[in-house]
Image (cartoon, rainbow, N blue to C red):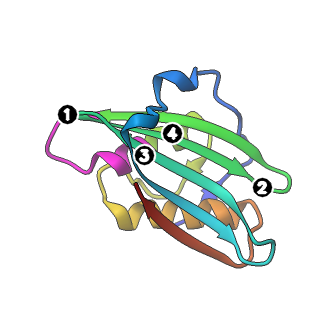
């Protein structure tokens, strides 16, 4: 999978609609092993039937953020919410991830890390 970050931006949406701190369930982070810090953070929050995602990308020359929401039943909502957040930040992926599961989440985060210049990346998952 490849990512295009040429048009990356900060969303104009309000974070309060998407960040539900009391509903935090997990985070995927791309850690730059050379710099020793995280370059990408995708945090997930869940309510009864919805998954929310807040995405922050912090590259050397690229910075952006986006928020996404997926609701309903019968598919992998976290990957769909991340897909929405990625599009909200104007990042383009070569492959779809919406509904494709945790493996797609990891691949997308790794692809974005590659695109922002992270040479050695570790994708870490943390749970609440």
Residue 18 as seen in the image, left or right of residue 33 = left
The residue range painted magenta reads 71-82
**Among the two numbered marks 1 and 4 on one chain, the one whose residue lies closer to the N terminus:** 1
Residue at mark 3:
44
- Give 35 or 79, whichever is nearer the viewer: 35
Is residue 103 at least partly visible in the picture?
A: yes
Is residue 2 at least partly visible in the picture?
A: no
Q: CA distance from mark 2 to mark 4?
A: 17 Å
Give the foreground label among 4 and 3. Answer: 3
Query: Is the residue under label 2 in contact with that under label 1 (CB below 8 Å)?
Result: no
Residue 116 as seen in the image, left or right of residue 46 = right
Name the residue located 20 percent from the left edge and 48 percent from the top edge: 75
Element type at marker 4?
helix
**Among the two numbered marks 3 and 1 on one chain, the one whose residue lies closer to the N terminus:** 3
**Among the two numbered marks 2 and 4 on one chain, the one whose residue lies closer to the N terminus:** 2
Element type at marker 2?
loop
Q: Residues within 10 Å of mark 3 (few under 14, many from 20)?
A: many
Say above or below: 13 vs 128. above
Give the foreground label among 3 and 1. Answer: 3
Q: Outermost residue, left direction?
A: 74
Spot occupied by residue 121 in the image (x, y as percentages of width and height)? 65, 74
Spot occupied by residue 114 in the image (x, y as percentages of width and height)? 68, 67
Residue at mark 1:
72
Residue at mark 2:
59
**Among the two numbered marks 1 and 2 on one chain, the one whose residue lies closer to the N terminus:** 2
Is residue 81 a member of the stretch shown in magenta?
A: yes
Disc ID at residue 85: 4
Is residue 85 a member of the stretch shown in magenta?
A: no
- Give 112 or 42, whichever is nearer the viewer: 42
Q: CA distance from mark 3 to mark 1?
A: 16 Å
Q: CA distance from mark 4 to mark 3?
A: 11 Å
């Amino acid at each position: 999978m490849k990512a295009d970050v040429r048009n990356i931006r900060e969303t104009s949406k309000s974070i309060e609609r998407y960040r539900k701190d009391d509903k935090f369930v997990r985070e995927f982070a791309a850690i730059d092993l050379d710099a020793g810090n995280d370059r990408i953070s995708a945090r997930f929050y869940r309510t009864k039937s919805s998954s929310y995602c807040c995405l922050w990308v912090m590259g050397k020359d690229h910075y952006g953020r986006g928020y996404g929401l997926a609701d309903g039943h019968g598919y992998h909502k976290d990957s769909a919410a991340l897909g929405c957040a990625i599009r909200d930040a104007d990042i383009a992926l070569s492959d779809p991830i919406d509904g494709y599961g945790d493996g797609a989440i990891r691949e997308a985060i790794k692809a974005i890390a590659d695109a922002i210049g992270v040479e050695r990346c570790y994708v870490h998952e943390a749970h609440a």
